[in-house]
């Protein structure tokens, strides 16, 4: 799970921003992933799900878009 060090800061950042907005949960997260990061879609989603357990992102749907590049960027997230 080499994605852990990439995903944990994303979860932490979304959690912080969502709580500042008074959110009870995050329902959807859209993420743009650079193909040169070596991240695989299924592995990313599985790791995200494991790391999100017990957080307000636990039931969030993850949408990944891959592009030629080297960064991972959160495009948006929806809250309730």
Image (tube, grey):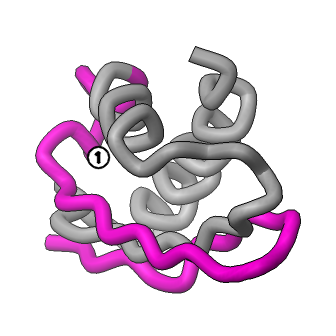
Between 57 and 24, which is closer to the camera in this rendering?
57
Q: Position of residue 5 (x, y in %)?
A: 73, 27
Look at the image and tell me in which quarter the C terminus lies.
Answer: bottom left
Magenta stretch: includes residue 75: yes
Q: Position of residue 11 (x, y in %)?
A: 52, 44
- 58 sits left or right of 66 in the view: left
* Region of the chain picked out in magenta, as a range: 51-80
For residue 68, above or below residue 24: below
Between 39 and 45, which is closer to the camera in this rendering?
39
Look at the image and tell me in which quarter the N terminus lies.
Answer: top right
- 56 sits left or right of 30 in the view: left
Q: Quadrant of residue 73?
A: bottom right
Q: Position of residue 35 (x, y in %)?
A: 70, 64
For residue 68, above or below residue 55: below
Residue at 61% from the left image edge and 33% from the top image edge? 8
Residue at 27% from the left image edge and 78% from the top image edge? 78
For residue 13, above or below residue 11: below
Between 8 and 44, which is closer to the camera in this rendering?
44
Q: Position of residue 2 (x, y in %)?
A: 68, 20
Magenta stretch: includes residue 18: no
Direction top: furthest residue: 1
């Amino acid at each position: 799970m080499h994605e852990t060090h990439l995903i944990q800061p994303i979860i932490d950042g979304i959690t912080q921003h969502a709580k500042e907005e008074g959110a009870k949960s995050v329902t959807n997260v859209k993420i743009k992933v650079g193909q040169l990061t070596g991240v695989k879609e299924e592995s990313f989603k599985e790791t995200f799900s494991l790391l999100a357990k017990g957080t307000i992102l636990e039931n969030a749907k993850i949408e990944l878009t891959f592009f030629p590049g080297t960064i991972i960027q959160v495009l948006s997230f929806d809250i309730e």
